[in-house]
Structure formats: structure tokens, C-alpha cells
Amino acid sequence: MALFVRNRRPVVLDGRLRHIAFIMDGNGRWAQKRGLPREQGHKIGAKAFQKIALHCESLGFEAMTVYAFSTENWKRPAREVDAIMDLLEEYIDSSEKEMEGHSVRFCFIGDRSPLRPSLQEKMTRVEEITADGRMTLNIAINYGARAELCRAAEQLRSTDTPITEQAMSEALYTAKSGDPDIIVRTGGDLRISNFLLWQAAYAELYFSKKLWPDFSPEDVDDVIREFYTRKRRYGGL
Ligand code: IPE
Ligand code: IPE
Ligand code: MG
């Protein structure tokens, strides 16, 4: 029997792996495959996200960044966009209870100004009440890396700050959590879709064919094992 069981040895993080990022893709296809409306995929995807965030906190990650809604996702039908916004509000409402026993600092990245006021208020409130949390959880909503880079450049220009790599990094939404060590994309597509373009410079990339609602904490453990087989050279030897 043991032959058929995946390597379940618990993974232990060391200083090489501090920050993990996820492009949570494949919710719509997950639902469509089952003859369900796409919104149902987002609902189950939100549950997968909840479990994985708790798992990453338990493992001791310093930061986790997830792509929840891109600047391009407004192109979708209003019904789907509204359902995603409803789910985000529900998620924030339930997070206090869900996160019990875990220490997570919520941080929303992206331009929140076009979001509905009720969602903006919840985002600000949960950020305030979790400000002392241990693991930073960056949730990207109305986030696009190009917009983030333009905003950072504009900020440096308007304050007459010399444009250095360090100044740019510090002007990004991720200033506090730094660059991800690994970026995981589910759903089978091999692209970045305007996520963390600057921060991804030397990130390891991991692509999974699994659709996001099917992605589990065990799959995260597989990502971690794979990460430790990679040799990061940063251009050196
Ligand atoms: C990712 O799943 C979630 C968002 C982009 C909001 P998708 O909704 O893109 O699912 P697929 O890629 O169409 O299956
Ligand atoms: C990326 O997925 C955005 C999120 C997961 C939030 P998309 O489904 O929007 O990306 P494309 O359109 O396949 O590139
Ligand atoms: Mg998609």
C-alpha cells in the first residue's frame, strides 16, 4: 500500500522560503465542468483559499500573497463580478472566526477606490484589527502589476526621489513583505497575467494543472518539496 501513498512527510520551512504567492486560477472551469454557474466555482475557490491560508500560517510562512481579482477582471459580466465582490465581503466577515488560533495580518493590495464602499470599509477594519498578526496575508483585489509600477513611479517622481531599485521596491504595495520566493499558478495556464511583475524577478515558478478549488494543503506541501529541489543562482554560479 505504502507504494501508492504520496510522500506525506511533514514539510519544514527554513530561511530559504519565507513568502509564497498564488495565482488562484480555474474557478470558472471547475464549475463549468460540473454544469454549475461560474459563481459556484468562486465560492468553492474561496473555501480552498481559506484552508490554504491557515495551512501556510501554521507552516510558519512570513508572507503569503494571493491574486483574487485583477484590474482586467472587470471585463467579466457584472453578475460574476458582483458575485466575487459578495464573496470577498463574506470572506472578510467570517475571517475573524476562521482565523481563530492563527496569527494573520491582513493587507489588501491594489487600487481599492473603485470598490463598493461596504467592501472598502471591511478591508480597512480587518487590516486594523489584525495589524499585529504574524504572517502577512496580501490579498490582491483590483490589482495589476503595471498599474502598481505606474503608481510607484509617480510617487517617486512627485516626491523627487531618485529612481533606484530599492526606492521602487519600497514604493510597491508589497514593500513590507518583499519579493515572493515562489509563485504558484493553478489552472494549467503558463502565464503571469499582470501579477507581481517587479517582485517576480527571481521568484521560482510553479504551474499546476489542478483547478484552484481542487488545490489543497497537501498540494502546497508538494510545492514546498519542489521548491527545495530548485537551485537559485540569481545570475551567479
Ligand atoms: C480565477 O478563476 C479567479 C478570478 C480570476 C477572479 P477564473 O474565474 O479565472 O477561472 P477560469 O480560469 O475561468 O477557469
Ligand atoms: C488571473 O487569472 C487573475 C486571478 C487569478 C485573479 P485570469 O483568469 O484573469 O487570467 P487570464 O485571463 O487567464 O490571463
Ligand atoms: Mg482564469
Image (tube, helix red, strand yellow):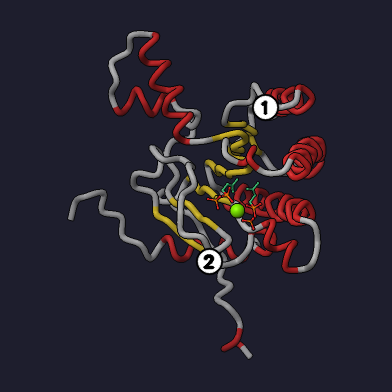
Say which element carries label 2. helix
| Residue 135 visible to an observer of this rendering | no
Q: Which residue is mark 2?
A: 222
Q: Amino acid at mark 2?
A: Asp
Can you give x and y, in whole percent of width and height, for residue 49 in the image? 68, 51
Viewport quadrant of the N terminus? bottom right
Viewport quadrant of the C terminus? bottom left
Q: Residue at x 75, y 39 (%)?
A: 78
145 on left or right of 59: left
In this view of the protein, which residue sits in the foreground, 169 or 192?
A: 192
In this view of the protein, which residue sits in the foreground, 29 or 139?
A: 29
Q: Earlier in the sequence, mark 2 or mark 1?
A: 1
Report, in whole angstroms, how far the alpha carbon at label 2 lies from the one at label 1: 30 Å
Mark 1 nearby-residue class (10 Å; few <14, some 14–19, many ≥20): some
Q: Residue at x 47, y 51 (%)?
A: 183
Q: Which residue is mark 1?
A: 127
Above/below status of 6 relative to 132: below
Question: Which residue is farthest top?
Answer: 159
34 on left or right of 207: right
Say which element carries label 1. helix
